[in-house]
């Protein structure tokens, strides 16, 4: 009891204390925030090792315990990174207070067993997200509004879903609930709650707030919320529904798989054509959710484990990518791929950590992303045993998406770190301070560790205990051996390369027809996939996407404003017509009540 | 001895209004102080009466010592106490706010006279145990509010007040007609006595006809669609404290309270009437919510939003289940807090910038930190974001709809809550966040008294959820919903208390 409540109460109080510390003691506030987040990490480690705990309305089991650990970990990463990145921000007190509250309430959401507590914590996280996006300044105001309408709106749908759950079972504790999806009410209950989870995690069609947020919010906020914490929570809720609360039927599973597959492909296609690296990463944050939903949608242990593992990996490499990108923006002040380039020399640590994270997200072995995608594929193969053709399409979508992810990261890495800058301003760049390179470096290291030692660390301690039934693999991937072979192979390749070419290399500036190429002709990464954009059908789809035809938010707005137009037309301000309404209303009441 | 408290709710504001009209004009600042003291006293007594009610139960005061049903009675039950606290608490904070805000108008003492008369009328409606007196007090409050809407005496204010007066009078006439019919059937005006007479049966069609009159009359006072059209003109045109008063408490005490009292305790509810209430509620919910989203005038947006939120209250009460009535009443209390707060915010913005057009604002957060953070709290409360009070009441209403098998209503309640969030996000986006306009670079935060009221209301928004705590719930919210749920049993309890 005390174990679970203490970190939450502490975070609430610490947030209030931060707001009360006078403004001139900036260092005190920052240190205090860092200490609080470290304390919360320690508390979550303690919860991790003392689970399972069940105190009625709060409980921790195999699934929530590693989520709690992840929340604590990313909280520290975000706070540490913010110390430097947010150093010139004026309203820093409310910023840190919201960060600390976000950590506390995320833990509360993950450990709550009572539906009411879950809804309240979940809803409050929407508010902190809104306020944290607003830290981005006046230009973020529109984005924060949109994000909060989507998140808050899906929260209210979720409330209705939980209301239906309560209606069906009469129970408010999740651990007592087990509903088979056999009637339309139970199906809607599942779907409405899942919408809450989708919007939080950023699955289609509730994803549109993620890329916008990535563009306008400060980088640590993006790395902290849409990239890591919101994924953890959204997918946690989905997994909780699928594993414990509902017994899914095959059509619901199929629905989840379709949502997952569509999300993967559509979002990665959007990512491919972005020119702003923050927005590019934002679309990938959406695309990766597809794998998690797909994995969970397969409904078999391997697939669900793959989805959960992918969630963990995604949180790690995606926040690593955002933070690395933050370093680039911090030094150059730019986030436009067209005007960056050649930074690998000046920012080696950032480069290496971003490269590792990019390889991991693209599913290159032996990094962690490969392993979890591999598990999702196995889940699909398992699904194939029960027949049907859906799994083939999902598998194709997943693999195709993986390829495109690699393609877009080649573009990203090339445009930022390799090649040559358009102007000379990037020349004076140097590596950032330790408090900024350390977080992405830690995350990159985790990408390697979780890939190479997948069986021995993450799967054993985090993922396998989360599943009620055990975990069995169809095809094993001996990650450690494979890594050794990979390294040996790469080593041999390098040796061959060096032996053959060591003397034959001559470096020179590029030239055409004897003339030196001027910088306009230089190959920027952004042009890599112009050919895809120009394909006839795809071109039209992109144009529609640009017009927000596929944006549920914009379409909903258009729909509602159509009715508003009608209502406004009726309210013409003329007294006599208003009196006629009263009369009509009374007549209708008379006819219906007095018979 | 505690009975003497009951008439005080009418006597204090009425006496203060009288004194104000005698002295207020001559001594500067007198009316400010007098009105603040009077409303403060009222708020204190109303909160004190919560504890008294907890100890003694229902109290009847016999006016002039005449025994009801011959004489006039004042009755204080759970619902009365609940409404008295709501009205007087808000009235006190608004009175404080007016000290600074009304500086820009001339003839402040007239404003205070009308304001206090309105409070007297509302308290009278709530505490009266007699249907005709309820009507009299209702007219006092309504006529004072017509005058207050016109207080600015500009073109827009006068037009709005005229519309309001005409429609309000139509409603009042139907209410009076309904009372006359009831009198002809029951030969009494005391509500408890009337309830007993009606329970004996006979002439059910006249009772239904009266129900329709009351639905229209009180429905217009509480701005239920399609009787709502006066509100979007009247509420924005009044001075901000009065808008807060009108939206915050007037439509509830004259409308919702009267409906709850008359239908549940006097006429008795039937499934048809309840479903009519729910349909009116849902219509208001939808149309008010949609129109609010389409507004660019800050106060007009808030006015439409009041229609929508009254829809929630009506929907909850119309469900007729314990959970629904409790949720509806809770939302009524919460709405009076956050809607007053938001109207006071809009007043503060207008005070500083001189405009109500959201498109001409922007970035006020930097210049007006108190107004902007309190308005954020108000917006979050009304949009139903935890941990603020509106979240809990909406949650209860949605749960009650589901529990009563009214899934369609539950879906509407949820969808409109999404829309509510959307239009308050619009307010936040255009007024407080976003770029600071060049024209507004010199504005200042509003004066102390205005800040005081806004902060107090914001704190109440934050603390509102605590009313659901076990110990607190029974003596306030639980007592109110029990009073409504008692239904026709009201009469018996009142007669026991008379003896």
Image (tube, coloured by chain):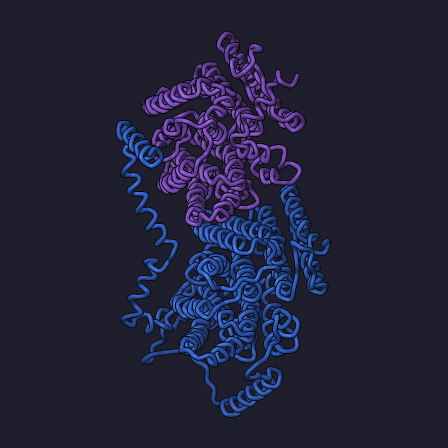
Query: Horizontally, is B13 left or right of B176 in the view?
Result: right
Name which residue lies at 45% across and 28% down: B267
Question: In terms of depth relative to the viewer, which is nearer, B158 or B247?
Answer: B247
Query: Horizontally, is A565 left or right of B404 in the view?
Result: left
Question: In terms of depth relative to the viewer, which is nearer, B448 or A48?
Answer: A48
Q: Position of residue B15 (x, y in %)?
A: 53, 12
Name which residue lies at 68% across and 60% down: A44
Q: Position of residue A310 (x, y in %)?
A: 54, 70
Q: Position of residue B213 (x, y in %)?
A: 37, 27
Q: Position of residue B343 (x, y in %)?
A: 46, 32
> What is chain A's hue in the picture?
blue
Residue B372 in sight? no
Residue A551 in sight? yes
Quadrant into which the N terminus of chain A falls: bottom right
Quadrant into which the C terminus of chain A falls: top left
Which chain, by letter, is purple?
B
Name which residue lies at 55% across and 14% down: B11
- In the picture shown, does residue B13 fall above or below B366? above
Query: Horizontally, is A40 left or right of B477 in the view?
Result: right
Quadrant of res A572 = top left
């Amino acid at each position: 009891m005390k174990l679970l409540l203490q970190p939450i109460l502490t975070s609430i109080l610490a947030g209030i204390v931060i707001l009360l510390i006078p403004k001139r003691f900036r260092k005190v506030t920052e240190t205090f925030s860092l200490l609080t987040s470290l304390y919360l990490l320690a508390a979550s480690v303690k919860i991790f090792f003392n689970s399972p705990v069940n105190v009625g309305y709060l409980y921790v089991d195999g699934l929530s315990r590693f989520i709690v650990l992840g929340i604590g970990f990313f909280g520290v990463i975000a706070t540490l990174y913010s110390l430097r990145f947010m150093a010139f921000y004026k309203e820093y007190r409310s910023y840190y207070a919201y960060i600390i509250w976000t950590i506390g309430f995320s833990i509360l959401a993950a450990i709550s067993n009572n539906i009411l507590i879950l809804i309240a914590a979940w809803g409050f996280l929407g508010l902190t997200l809104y306020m944290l996006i607003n830290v981005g300044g006046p230009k973020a105001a529109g984005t924060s509004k949109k994000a909060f309408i989507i998140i808050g709106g899906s929260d209210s749908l979720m409330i209705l879903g939980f209301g239906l759950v309560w209606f069906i079972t009469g129970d408010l504790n999740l651990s007592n609930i087990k509903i088979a999806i056999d009637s339309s009410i139970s199906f809607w209950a599942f779907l409405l709650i899942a919408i809450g989870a989708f919007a939080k995690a950023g699955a289609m069609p509730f994803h549109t707030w993620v890329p916008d947020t990535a563009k306008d919010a400060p980088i640590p906020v993006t790395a902290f919320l849409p990239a890591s914490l919101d994924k953890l929570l959204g997918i946690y809720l989905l997994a909780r529904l699928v594993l414990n609360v509902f017994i899914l039927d095959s059509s619901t599973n199929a629905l989840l798989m379709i949502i997952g597959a569509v999300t993967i492909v559509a979002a990665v296609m959007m990512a491919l054509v972005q020119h702003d690296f923050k927005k590019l990463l934002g679309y990938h944050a959406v695309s990766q959710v597809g794998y998690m939903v797909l994995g969970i949608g397969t409904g078999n242990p391997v697939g669900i484990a793959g989805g959960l593992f992918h969630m963990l990996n995604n949180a790690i490499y995606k926040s690593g990518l955002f933070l690395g990108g933050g370093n680039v923006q911090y030094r150059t002040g730019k986030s436009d791929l067209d005007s960056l380039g050649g930074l690998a020399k000046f920012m080696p640590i950032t480069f290496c950590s971003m490269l590792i994270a990019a390889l991991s997200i693209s599913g290159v072995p032996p990094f962690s992303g490969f392993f979890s995608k591999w598990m999702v594929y196995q889940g699909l193969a398992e699904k194939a045993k029960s027949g049907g053709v859906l799994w083939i399409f999902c598998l194709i979508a997943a693999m195709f998406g993986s390829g495109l992810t690699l393609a877009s990261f080649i573009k990203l890495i090339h445009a930022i770190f390799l090649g040559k800058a358009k102007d000379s301003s990037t020349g004076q760049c140097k590596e950032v301070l330790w408090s900024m390179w350390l977080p992405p470096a830690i995350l990159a290291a985790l990408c390697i560790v979780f890939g190479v030692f997948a069986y021995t660390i993450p799967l054993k301690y985090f993922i396998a205990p989360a599943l009620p039934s055990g975990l069995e693999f169809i095809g094993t991937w001996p990650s450690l051996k494979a890594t050794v072979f990979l390294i040996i192979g790469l080593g041999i390749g390098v040796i061959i390369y060096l032996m053959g070419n060591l003397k034959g290399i001559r470096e020179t500036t590029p030239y055409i027809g004897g003339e030196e190429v001027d910088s306009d002709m230089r190959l920027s990464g952004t042009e890599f996939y112009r050919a895809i954009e120009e394909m006839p059908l795809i071109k039209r789809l992109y144009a529609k996407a640009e017009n927000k035809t596929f944006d549920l938010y914009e379409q909903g707005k258009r729909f509602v404003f159509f009715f508003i137009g009608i209502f406004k037309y009726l309210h013409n301000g003329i007294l006599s017509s208003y009196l006629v309404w009263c009369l009509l209303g009374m007549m209708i009441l008379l006819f219906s009540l007095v018979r | 001895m505690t009975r003497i408290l009951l008439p005080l709710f009418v006597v204090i504001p009425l006496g203060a209004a009288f004194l104000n009209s005698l002295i207020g004009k001559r001594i500067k600042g007198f009316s400010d102080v007098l009105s603040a003291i009077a409303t403060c006293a009222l708020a204190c007594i109303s909160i004190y009466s919560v504890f008294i009610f907890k100890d003694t139960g229902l109290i009847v005061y016999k006016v002039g010592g005449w025994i009801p049903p011959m004489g006039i009675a004042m009755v204080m039950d759970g619902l009365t106490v609940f409404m008295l606290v709501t009205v007087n608490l808000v009235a006190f904070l608004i009175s404080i706010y007016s000290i600074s805000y009304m500086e820009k108008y001339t003839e402040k003492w007239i404003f205070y006279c009308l304001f206090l008369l309105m409070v007297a009328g509302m308290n009278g409606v709530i505490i009266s145990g007699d249907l005709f007196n309820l009507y009299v007090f209702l007219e006092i409050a309504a006529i004072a509010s017509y005058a207050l809407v016109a207080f600015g005496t500009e073109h827009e204010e006068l037009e709005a007040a005229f519309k309001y007066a005409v429609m309000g009078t139509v409603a009042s006439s139907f209410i009076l007609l309904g009372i006359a019919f009831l009198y002809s059937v029951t030969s009494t005006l005391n509500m408890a006595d009337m309830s007993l007479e009606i329970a004996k049966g006979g002439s059910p069609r006249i009772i239904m006809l009266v129900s329709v009159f009351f639905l229209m009359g009180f429905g217009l006072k509480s701005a239920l669609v399609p009787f709502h059209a006066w509100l979007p003109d009247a509420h924005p045109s009044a001075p901000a404290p009065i808008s807060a008063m009108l939206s915050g408490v007037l439509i509830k005490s004259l409308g919702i309270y009267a409906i709850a009292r008359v239908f549940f305790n006097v006429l008795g509810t039937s499934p048809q009437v309840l479903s009519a209430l729910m349909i009116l509620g849902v219509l208001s919910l939808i149309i008010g919510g949609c129109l609010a989203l389409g507004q660019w005038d800050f106060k007009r947006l808030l006015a439409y939003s009041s229609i929508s939120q009254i829809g929630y209250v009506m929907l909850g009460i119309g469900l007729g289940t314990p959970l629904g009535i409790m949720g509806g009443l809770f939302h009524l209390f919460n709405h009076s807090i956050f809607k007053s707060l938001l109207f006071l915010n809009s007043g503060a913005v207008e005070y500083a910038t001189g405009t109500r057009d959201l498109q001409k604002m922007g970035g006020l957060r930097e210049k007006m930190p108190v107004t902007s953070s309190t308005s954020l709290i108000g917006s979050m409360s009304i949009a139903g974001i935890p941990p603020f009070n509106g979240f809990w009441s909406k949650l209860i209403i949605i749960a009650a709809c589901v529990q009563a098998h009214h899934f369609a209503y539950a879906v509407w309640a949820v969808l409109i809550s999404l829309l509510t969030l959307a239009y308050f996000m619009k307010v936040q986006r255009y007024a407080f966040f976003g770029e600071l306009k060049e024209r507004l670079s010199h504005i200042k935060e509003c004066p102390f008294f205005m800040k005081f009221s806004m902060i107090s209301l914001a704190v109440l928004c934050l603390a509102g959820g605590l009313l659901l705590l076990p110990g607190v719930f029974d003596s306030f919210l639980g007592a109110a919903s029990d009073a409504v749920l008692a239904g026709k049993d009201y009469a018996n309890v009142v007669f026991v208390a008379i003896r």
